Amino acid sequence: MWSGLTYLMQIDTKIPDLILIAGIFIALIFAVTVIYFVSNSLKRAKSINSAFTYLVYALARAVEAKEEETGNHILRVGEFCALIARQLGMSGYFVEQIRVQAALHDIGKIHTPREILLKPEPLTPKEWEIMKKHTTFGAVIVGNHERLAMGRNIALTHHEKWDGSGYPCGLKGDAIPIEGQIIAIADQYDALRSPRPYKPVYDHKTAYKMLTEGDGRIYPEHFSPRVLNAFKKVEAGFEAIYAKLKDTGAAREFTVDFCPLINTKKSLS
């Protein structure tokens, strides 16, 4: 009898330990499960972000092809914008978003007649009015999705000027979104450095002087003073980026046969 009671007492003293061990084991299973699902969610989020970036660039390249660009223009402008944004102390998220979504700035040119885009002579007043519409067309194409809000602002406002002399809305000062203020100088710098049917190519020193001092067509008053000051501080970075991503001048080739690349064994689910 006494031995039976002793055995039961021993079991009773072990119960809290068993409960503790069971609790730890359950907690470990829960933690592993959470880590597994978080890991999968992060991988999926990374995959979605990668697809988002790819599609933004693919959409932008459609316009580049129409203008007979090599595609490096959109990459350079994105890097220029990221450089200025970082100098301005913007968040890492903002820097990465403007790096990608800056590619959408000229997306509206897909509606601009090719003969206007490639015309070597000055545009007539009527042609110029058509050209200016690429900003509003771009905003319509990008749409109202919150993920592309920056891209929409960029497409609409990249030709607005700080002094209110820009288009399409004649916005002035901080009425222009900060992304529009940043890309205004980034796009202008790249336009000066790059060959165009209607203008010569300018070297870095000349382009820098035109932006910071003016040349009778471009004036410092066109740009946000804060953004222009940031540009002055990182101008060496602009020169390095342009040299690294300089166009090769090679003609585009669109005769790739994609049919062999189709994989009939995989389908989207």
Image (cartoon, rainbow, N blue to C red):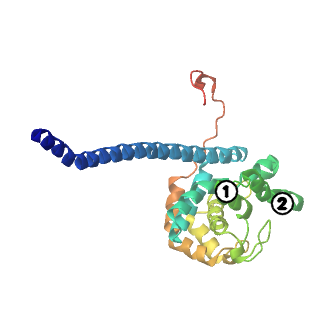
Query: Residue at the spot x=52%, y=46% of the render?
Result: 45
Q: Would you call the spot at circle 2 few (<14 residues within 10 Å), some (14-19), or many (20 or more)?
A: few
Q: Quadrant of the N terminus?
A: top left
Amino acid carrying mark 1 in the image: Glu
**256 above or below 91?**
above
Give the residue number, with chain letter if any, for mark 1: 146
Amino acid on which the number 2 mark rests in the picture: Trp
User: How many residues crowd mark 1 within 10 Å: few (<14), some (14–19), many (20+)?
Assistant: few
Name the front one of labels 2 and 1.
1
Farthest-out residue, front: 1
Q: Which one is nearer the viewer's eye here, 167 or 253?
A: 167
The answer to whether residue 70 of the structure is visible from this angle is no
Looking at this rendering, what residue extends furthest in the left direction?
3
| Residue displayed at 58% across by 24% down | 263
Could you tell me residue 178's position as x and y percent?
64, 69
Q: Is residue 194 left or right of residue 161?
A: left
Q: Position of residue 54 (x, y in %)?
A: 59, 44
Q: Which residue is mark 2?
A: 128
